[in-house]
Image (cartoon, rainbow, N blue to C red):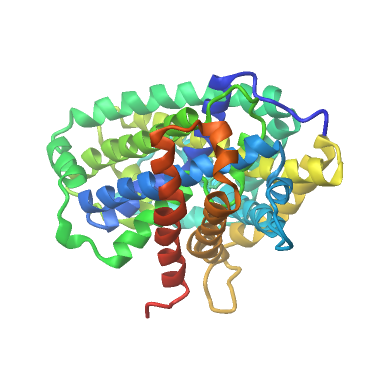
Amino acid sequence: MASRGHWGGKLGFILAAAGGAVGLGNIWKFPYVVGQNGGGAFIFIYLVSVIFAGLPLLIAEIYIGKTSQKNPVGAFRFFQKGSVPFSIIGYAGVVTAIIILSYYSVISGWTMHYLFLSLKGFSGSEEAVKGLFGQMYESPATNIFWHSLVMLIGVLIISNGVQKGIEKVTKILMPLLGILLVSLMIYALTLDGAGKALSFLFYPDFSSITPKVMLEALGTSFFTLSLGMGAMITYGSYLSKDISISQSSIQIAVIDTVIALMAGLTIFPIVFTNNLEPSAGPSLIFQTLPVLFSKMPGGYIISIAFFSLIIFAAITSAISLLEVVVSFAVDERGVSRKISTIFFGVVIWLVGLLSAISSFKTPGGQPYLDFLDGIVTKYLMPIGGLLTIIIFGWAISKAQKNEEFGKTKIFAVFNFVVKFISPVLLAFIVLNELGLFG
Ligand code: PHE
């Protein structure tokens, strides 16, 4: 399409892609998974996964997008050789984006509700503050209200396009997020529990590394880097030829990882200062922290800053999910951006009702939100990632990749990693999830 959007420049791309990557995964999920999996050892494996699977796949996805200048479906078709329809991976990505956004929007809504509660101020007994989560979780009206607001904000931003929508918003929200996070982290590091938090996060107790911890670390690194479902392909497709992929990818991966670590450095000193269990799980930021906010000096301002920060992170990720779907409709079906955004906004909003109404359960009795998140992080993203890296490693010739990456020694090493190491790591994960290792 002649009228596809483009980023205004390199900074615009980096901020948009880092904005897509940095989200609930970094600030909500990463700290609680670290807490549940023993701290330092988990972080060590997480970093190894980012280097050997996350970064190579990020480079591969941005390459596939930039070279084809297409949405994920068109992009995979562009590289097709022979009769195997590569575009299926693109379709799977679009469906995955719809599923993720449907529940991501609901959790983003929770963070908005908690900003609203912060503005009112957390007060009362510990039980009362903890109970706020259950009240919200069980109220369809509250969930649907905030879920609708998140989807509406997403539709408004995405209908304005790549430069005037995504780029403009991320250029404002990402610096704000940085300022808030740095300030909160500095504050947290002055607390008594900071020393304990540092050793919990950075002193790896290797005996706590089990296959389950390794899988969890890999899955988390994929989710926080937005891999295996076409988001980075889509953002890469708005790159112009003169922007270097390897450099930008490293910057994006570093920003994403540093922000996850900073979230840990903010949350754990607060947790340890107050002798709380780091392994509280998903409720860590919605139940554990608010109890502290209600007691600690300055808790009012800190809770407002904290929940604003998460909202900024969530919005810049939510729009990257919507853009995957919209770019597909615009490129492949020739529908206008406005109409596709509204149409898919409504579709995703409807699917999201499954997760927003917590009394809806799967036949197995699981809430839809947990069920969908499990399908995405255990199966859809790792399988999508595995197929993408295989295509990048094996179906795209070395000569073709040399045009983008040059003929350097580093490229030779990288090409070896994407052909042999990353696919094996990913295959291991996928096979394990499918139950092949018992
Ligand atoms: N990376 C986002 C986060 O960490 C989640 C996400 C996944 C966004 C896939 C887009 C695509 O919260």
Location of the N terminus (image quadrant)? top right
Residue 270, position as x, y percentages in the image? 24, 39
- Residue 75 found in image quarter: top right
Residue at 85%, 46% in the rendered image: 333
The correct choice, above or below, for 242 with respect to 214 in the image is above
Residue 358, position as x, y percentages in the image? 56, 63
The correct choice, above or below, for 282 with respect to 15 in the image is below
Location of the C terminus (image quadrant)? bottom left
- Residue 121 found in image quarter: top left
Residue at 41%, 61% in the rendered image: 424
Left or right position of 341 against 404: right
Q: Nearer the viewer, residue 227 or 81?
A: 81
Residue at 48%, 63% in the rendered image: 378
Q: Is residue 98 something one can see in this rendering?
A: yes
Left or right position of 277 against 315: left
Residue at 36%, 59% in the rendered image: 216
Exactly how many numbered labels are in the figure? Answer: 0
Residue 391, position as x, y percentages in the image? 58, 54
